[in-house]
Image (tube, coloured by chain):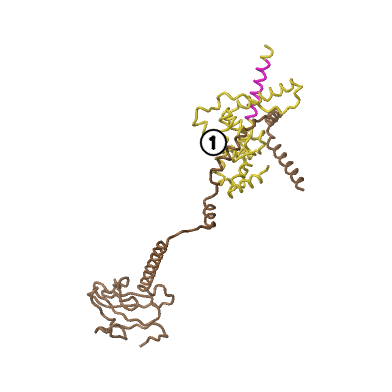
Chain colours: A brown, B yellow
Amino acid sequence: MKELDSIGSKGIEQEQSAKDDAFLDEELSNMARRVKQMDYLDPPASLLTSVMDAVRKKRAPSPWYARIYKWARSPKSITFTPLQVAFSAVVLVLGTTFLLTQFIENNQTVPFQSAHDRIPVLFSLDLADARSVAVIGSFNQWRPQGFEMQSNDEKQGAWTLTLNLPEGRYEYSFLIDGNRVVPDPRASLFQNDGFGNRNAVLILGTENDNAI
Amino acid sequence: MDHLDDLQCICAVLDGNVDAYSAIVERYQKPIFNLMYRMTGSRADALDLAQDAFIRAFERLDRFQKDKKFFPWLYTIAMNQARNLLRNNSRVSQSCCHDEWEGCSGLDYPQQQEDLMCSQLDTRVLHDAVMQLPLDYREAIVLRYREELSMEDVAEALEISVSGAKMRIHRGLKKLRDILTAFETKSNDSSCG
């Protein structure tokens, strides 16, 4: 069967070859036949040996990704001293601690940014003579950065800020001009902070065990 | 040996079996060596160039596209290698005197000395005529008729279009016919004289 296939493919090749040479006249076809019979020099035996000697000294060619894959698949042995292990362990522990600290700090700064169920809360304060007003409270660890209120262009002295907060109980106040703390005058609940000041209390959500 | 065998060898080499390359060298050393000989006219230079071409092909084997035929790809590398050397090295030149041609007779009847001599003369004349062809025409007709490559493969090896390859072959054969006719005329004149 293979033989038949081979004969068949040879026949097709010859047919194709004849088609390719259809543009040749008789005289040029004769030329082609003579070229076909042209003698070749035999290459010196040293050619094969010299090529193989040269390529054996070279690295087998392969694409870079194949080289990386091969390297990754081959087992590697690693030697180390106890001192190196101790040093690496210290670096690992310190690095992990640092990263964890950063992570916790970031999450504490804006605890509700990653929360899914949030309730929009509009904070507002009417204070015409203030230069800046910020909301500080238990939801932002009493830090004003990033919680500055915006003054209303239409109504002079109206400061507002909308926050999306998760359900819970919060205490908060307004920080005016960076140095004066005032509880929300419109709040219905207040709580003493233990230092002689009062904070407004905000309760969000229907099922709140922390309600006073 | 066909395309599949070439591919098997190439895959083996790419898998790290460098010795598999020897099958490729054995298979193609004759046409590549003869190409280099036609380019330089010197056996020593042809040997060096053929060696360089095979090494260069080995180094670039990972770039060979496996859906193509190997020999045209190798031939292109060899041609470029030879062209670069000829361009950079004036010592080796296409127009330099060729080593004495000793084509293989292939004849096995020494008692018929006259036939043998005629045959050798024909071989010599044909070789000289082919060598007088411009490089582009020469390689096109050698690839097509001596190496029996398809027109597509000739075009690929010479990095030209199929119609360009046909044109080169047609013109090359015409030129070869003119050269051979001139040889015969010259030979007849000298024998008459």
Q: Is residue B115 left or right of residue A89?
A: right
Task: Please name whichever residue, A92 or A156, is drawn nearer the observer in this view of the structure.
Answer: A92
Taking the view exactly as shown, the residue that stands out farthest to the front is A82
Taking the view exactly as shown, the residue that stands out farthest to the left is A129
Q: In this view, does A170 lie to the left or right of B72?
A: left
Q: In this view, does B179 lie to the left or right of A194?
A: right
Q: What stretch is highlighted in magenta?
A: B171-188
Which quadrant is the C terminus of chain A positioned in? bottom left
The chain ID associated with circle 1 is B
Q: Can see residue B159?
A: no
Looking at the rendered structure, the secondary structure element under dot 1 is helix
B173 magenta-colored: yes
The residue depicted at 53 percent of the width and 44 percent of the height is A58
Give how far across and how far down residue A105 sits, in percent: 35, 71
Dominant secondary structure of the residues highlighted in magenta in the image: helix
The residue depicted at 62 percent of the width and 34 percent of the height is A45
Give how far across and how far down residue A135 sits, in percent: 30, 76
Quarter where residue B168 is shown? top right
Give how far across and how far down residue A115 sits, in percent: 42, 75
Number of numbered markers: 1
Residue that numbered label 1 is attached to: B81
Q: Compared with residue B95, is residue B26 higher up or lower down, i.e. above or below? A: below
A76 magenta-colored: no
